[in-house]
Image: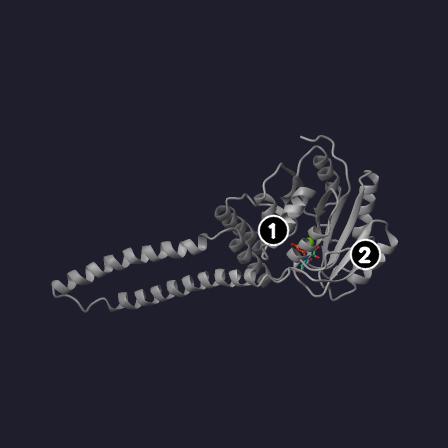
Amino acid sequence: MDTSRNGTMTVIIPAYNEAENIIIAAETVSNILQNAAIPYKLLFVDDGSSDETWAQIRYASDRFPHVAGLHFSRNFGKEGAIAAGLCNAKTECAAVMDCDLQHPPEKLVEMYRLWQTGIDVIEGIKTDRGKESFLHRFASHGFYRIISKLSDLDLENTSDFKLLDQKVVKIIREMPERNAFFRATTFWVGFRHATVSYEVQERIAGTSKWSGGKLIQYALNNIAAFSSTPMKMVLYLGVFMLIFDFIFGMIAFVQKIMGIALSGFTTIILLQVFIGAVMIISIGTIGFYIARIYTEIQGRPRFIISDSCGEDEDEYTAVG
Ligand code: UDP
Ligand code: MG
């Protein structure tokens, strides 16, 4: 194990309509890392914001040393912003954190120190989920229970707050999948892992960018990204239905022989409805996976960078 690594850390900060938070985030993170004598770069990724976010990032990169920014041609989503950050983080290690400072930046120091001892992936784990509605908490708990079971990765209380060694960044950068789920991918790749727990802070300004519908879509996509069990369940359901049909068939046959057929009309209606529902759900599940195969095959980029600022302004990977 190589003890005492040294090097620069790029902090990737996805930002979507975070105009009020850019300067505070740049200042707070810079101060903490400077005081800890950690060489760093801050890389803001403006995910096609419609407010003043990009102007604020440009301003921050003029005002503070080591601050750079990438601007997307439109909103590609947080996964796209993380991907763009990883594609352009060429330093010895890279961290990802939210722009609203819900991920306490002091923890970056702790993560960096662990990296220095030779750990390759340092995962931020939430000890307290902060202020969330009961429904949100319930749904998110359910989602992590399901995905952890299906994918065999323990993802409860994980987040996108993490630090990765450059060799891990390079591997993730080169993975060809289009529908990535960063949070789980860092577990999936393996390597020497450690965790750092943190309490989710309150957002410094603005509101959460996730609507209920967006969250459901996010959950379904990520389940599909890490498990094909729902498709197998369609097959199991088919077998179950076959056994069910067989039993009912036998009953009907016996009734016919005994001359007491023609009753049980309700049963037939119920069965019709039940089988219909199962068929539609099954086709839908398979269709969902086919849609994902389709987007993977199209191979469109996960992000398009239309503008950049800061050091190495012209050396960015613009699509990826
Ligand atoms: N974000 C992004 N693109 C999006 C939505 C969100 O880059 O389409 C960023 C956002 O600016 C923030 C982080 O992802 O830095 C987490 O978003 P948010 O705080 O809205 O989520 P929450 O903390 O409520 O889960
Ligand atoms: Mg947040």
Q: Which residue is mark 2?
A: 313
User: Residue at the location (45% across, 61% down)?
Assistant: 286
Determine the CA span between mark 2 and mark 1: 25 Å
Q: Secondary structure at mark 1?
A: loop
Q: Which residue is mark 1?
A: 175
Q: Please, is residue 94 above or below residue 22 in the view?
A: above
Q: Is residue 152 left or right of residue 70?
A: left
Residue 96 position, x and y percent, is 70, 48
Do we see residue 30 in this rendering?
Answer: yes
Q: Is residue 34 left or right of residue 281?
A: right
- For disc 1, the neighbor class at 10 Å (few under 14, some 14 to 19, many from 20) is few
Q: Secondary structure at mark 2?
A: loop
| Between discs 2 and 1, the one toward the N terminus | 1
Q: Amino acid at mark 2?
A: Glu
Task: Determine the image quadrant of residue 295.
Answer: bottom right
Task: Determine the image quadrant of residue 195.
Answer: top right
Q: Is residue 139 left or right of residue 86?
A: left
